[in-house]
Amino acid sequence: MNVQDRRRILGPIEAKPLAFPETKSTSNEETTVVLPEFQAPSIQTNLLKNCNGSCIIENENTSILSSIYGPRSTRSNLFESRCLINVTIKSAVFPTSELKELSSFLINVLESFVCLELYPKAGIDVFINLNIEQVSDLSWYIPYIMMSIVLGLVDAGIEISDLPGCGFNDNNAICFTKNGSEVIGIWRDKGDIKDESSFGDSLDICKDQYLQIKGLMASYLLSKLDDDKST
Amino acid sequence: MQELPKQAIPGQILAPQFDLLEPIPTSNNNSDNETSSNEEPTIIMYINGAGTKLINYPIGNNSKNSKEITVISSTKLGKVYSYDVDAPSDYKTIDESRKIQFKMISVGNSELMKQSQGKNESSNILPREGDVILCRVSRISLQRANVEILAVSSKNIPIDSGVGTNGSGTVAVQGGSGAQTFSVSQASSDVGETFRGIIRSQDVRATDRDKVVMIDCFKPGDIVKAQVISLGDGNNYYLTTARNDLGVIFARANNGAGGLMYATDWLSMTSPLSGITEKRKCANPF
Amino acid sequence: MTLSVAEKSYLYDSLASSPSIRPDGRQQHQFRPIEIYTDFLPSSNGSSRIIASDGSECIVSVKAKVVDHTIDDDLLQIEVEIAGERDDSLITESCTSLFNKLLRNIDIKKLQLTKKYSFKLFIDVLVISSNSNPVSLISFGIYSSLNCTSLPKLVSNFDDLEVEELPMFHDYDLVKLEVDPPLVFVLGIVKNNIFIDPAANESEVANNGLMISWINGRTIAPMRTFALNDTNTKGFSPKLMQEGIKLVERYAPDIANALQNI
């Protein structure tokens, strides 16, 4: 039997392997920053001139731009009595498969409050641009992404049955509607769920955040209505 | 009765579906209370117009005895309008002794809303049955003319100038709801993202419907005024020009090479430059 | 599956009633019968084929490679392929991303060979046909294939930092891989009822779907909602989530047991 010694020839007996000092790669290290749970952002809608609705949500390190196209024709060969929704998220920071997972999650959330039956044979396209300085978990951005989509949809004049919002606490991003009496989505990426009561607590905190966000969006929209009237 | 708010944001509850007009001493706005009152108040039934939606809203937040109430909720940002209307066609009178008034609530911002008494969904830019549209003929066959829909009358033009509903702009190559159902690699870049329609030969005119020769009615490139008769299938809206005011409105002679032609009668158009007369199914220009 | 309006309304009403009545008479926590075959691919370290009673079928294969874990610390890589879907379609990509997140819960210390080298596991999933949401099926497949995975037995030294040596393996002895694979449960929500393992017809009328992951007695991330159909999607009461977690925590150990005994 051909036995092969696969050990490297190590040289003379007294030879020692070269020991390199440990080099620390500081530049490429992905640093996950724990950001505070909710930062009140600045809101601006109706920015882009070539799409039906747009909204930018900004706080210190983040700027999230949504642009809404449609309702417009789809190339589907089937008769759709309801509207198709498509969400595309662009970001240089997160891997595409994760972004695609989030967009399919957001499509499902949107389907539960956009009045799809009003737009037969049509499609609504939502494009999200994430411009992020400090990298946190993707779930941290969901409240702001939701906010920018909802305000973008309102700006585009697409009929939605409620102003939904999303809260973030303890790795849970939970989307609510109808004043917090209904949940339309939950996204949780890491951490164990220790017990029900802690989950319930986190649910309540998310709900409070949702109400806060809803208040922000409502007051922004009402102030915009007043501006329209005065001009 | 509750006052209607002046303006609304999406999701704002505007009114319960049923309300009482005369405030009775112990009234509250619960729709169940109407039957128990001894006086004869007028019941208002609110009907959801444009920009509003009927939804079931849970009342009583505790888990066990939560009840749902049907309310009219806004789906748009804008001013609230209300109009007195007749009973909807599907409404059945159950109890003659009750006085019922019907009011339609709409939310919107445009003048169109006032003209149409809140019925026209001015915001909804999609072609619907009965709408008059402008379209461009893209292909002719013996049985039908294929068209691209360019504009829908009496509807707002959206900011993106209606790429897809009102023009033939191009959209991002990636993404888009087109990409969802159609491979991007198969899409050629010059395909307009418009809604497409079909004018079948029997829908071209109202008389002699089976003797229509398509090539004597339309040529590719003509701008046609037509009416939507049905949403059609997945690909096409079905359109008709069987009316005096519908048909070709703009056309060029010599398959688009010549000058603009003008309708001389309902079956022919003439170019004033060359004097060429061509056959078309024209719309009455007056 | 396309159901008529009348069928949908009948199904919805029966599922929404209290207690809910499922079309096939199952309990709230009951799974449809599944068939599992393990270790049937001769060229992979572990494999399983799982067939659900509605004809959904999925094949999972686990292959191993020796890598230097100081260079490549991503020791579990999963690739999902769904027949009839493009590789870059939303469902395929989100399944891949979801399972990659899920497998982060596996303790990669168990894959370590020596101080320098580890096994890297490549898990390939092929969904041959799926009539309802394939996520739960895939996770059962991964569970049973990881459970039957055997890797070559190391005969060389564990400590190879000082000596530059590649790990050597026994010619024919294999060691069973001992990891705790996670499981994913799909729950359907209809009005105020929540139930495990919605079938195709139940998915068609469900208001929403909930995905809960579980590993060895703990409820873990990822947890998600996702729509089971695109026509009936609605919000649901927040307490249903807690009910779902409770349901999974109660019945998951039994399911893990059943899968382990194959």
Image (cartoon, rainbow, N blue to C red):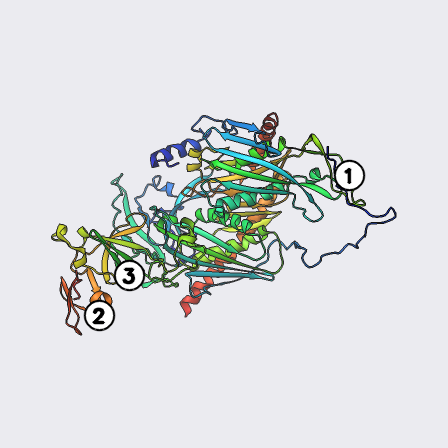
State the SS at label 1: loop
Residue A96, position as x, y percentages in the image: 54, 52
Where residue A50 appears, x then y in whole percent?
42, 64
Residue A200 in view of the camera: no
Estimate the spatial distance between the alpha carbons at disc 1 and disc 3, rounded to whole Å.
Answer: 80 Å
- The residue that disc 3 covers is B154
Residue at the spot of label 2:
B258
Q: Amino acid at mark 3?
A: Ser
Give B45 or A155, whichever is nearer the viewer.
A155
Question: Circle 1 marks a residue in which chain?
Answer: C
The image shows a total of numbered marks equal to: 3
Three-letter amino acid code of the residue under disc 1: Phe
| Element under disc 3 | loop
Residue A197 at least partly seen: yes
Left or right side of C11 for B202: left
C21 to C127, vertically: above or below: above
| Residue at the image point whose x is 29% and y is 58% from the top | B149
- Which residue is painted at 40% across and 49% down in the image? B181
The residue mark sitting in front, 1 or 3, is: 1
Q: What residue is pinned by disc 1?
A: C158
Looking at the picture, tell me which residue is in the foreground, A19 or B78.
Answer: A19
Q: Chain of mark 3?
A: B
Looking at the rendered structure, whether the residues under marks 2 and 1 are on a common chain is answered as: no
Corner quadrant of residue C241: top right
| Mark in the foreground, 2 or 3 | 2
Residue B112 in picture, x, y percent from top left: 30, 61
User: Which residue is most to the bottom?
Assistant: B273
